[in-house]
Amino acid sequence: MAKTQLLIADDEPDLLAELNPLLERAGFAVLTVLDGEQALKAIDINHPDLIVLDVLMPHMDGREVLRQLRQQGNWTPVILLTQIGTPTERALSLQEGADDYLNKPFEPLELVARIQAVLRRSQHENLPLNSFRLICSEKLLLDRQTRRAFWDGRDLMLSARAFGVLEYLMLNNQEIITRERLLDQVWGWSSPIGTRAVDTRINEIRKSLEDDPEKPQFIETVIGSGYRYLKGVSGQK
């Protein structure tokens, strides 16, 4: 069986030298390039199964590579790497079609785990959930453009942070998401707040959905690990 092929685009040769053998030991075939223009050429020639793009690269940044791929109708899964990023920038990147976001510096094994999780999700979908404006789960509907959530047509009036938490959990449904990861993805890497802020937003979501934490239907607390969205999720244009 052919190995799953990854393309890693990053302008830090030392990082590529560290990641390459680790990813190969994890069972992947790995191609590496140093900028966005090289990435587009390599994608066109090699058709990788998953792409990891550094946001800050010479000649063409990772978000522009992502934008061009999606405009071409190429929905190969993409993980973005960045050293900076506000929640707004994260939301824009996800709306443009990124499958996940990882901030530098990161533990290489976390990247391996993210790659494996994204590949598992993509094997069960023709298009990734984050390519859709609307995501649905039973009577729950999220409009990712207007940043509003509805239950059976009723506006849930969630705060912006609670919406971001719910959106990220739904986009990664069935996966255990740590509080630290939610802080990173929803609040931004530079936020000084603690993990209790995540619990507060989870409580807000549960209250809106009338979801009993003792017998959860939507969001499960995984003791010592984080949270998991339990229901199936689908996308609508």
Image (cartoon, rainbow, N blue to C red):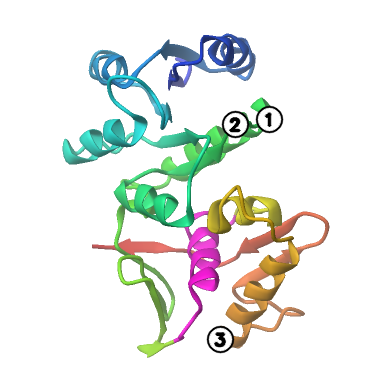
* In this rendering, position of residue 176 left or right of residue 15: right
Mark 1 or mark 2, which is nearer to you?
A: 1
Up-down: is 193 above or below 50? Answer: below
Which quadrant holds residue 142? bottom left
The Cα–Cα distance between marks 2 and 3, rounded to whole angstroms, is 33 Å
Does the stretch in magenta take in 163? yes
| Residue at screen point 24% across, 15% down | 41
Which quadrant holds residue 235? bottom left
Does the stretch in magenta take in 225? no
Up-down: is 53 above or below 30? Answer: below
Is residue 1 shown to the viewer in this render? no
Q: Amino acid at mark 1?
A: Glu
Is residue 150 shown to the viewer in this render? yes
* In this rendering, position of residue 91 left or right of residue 59: right
Q: Amino acid at mark 2?
A: Leu
- Residue 92, horizontal then vertical, whole percent: 35, 52
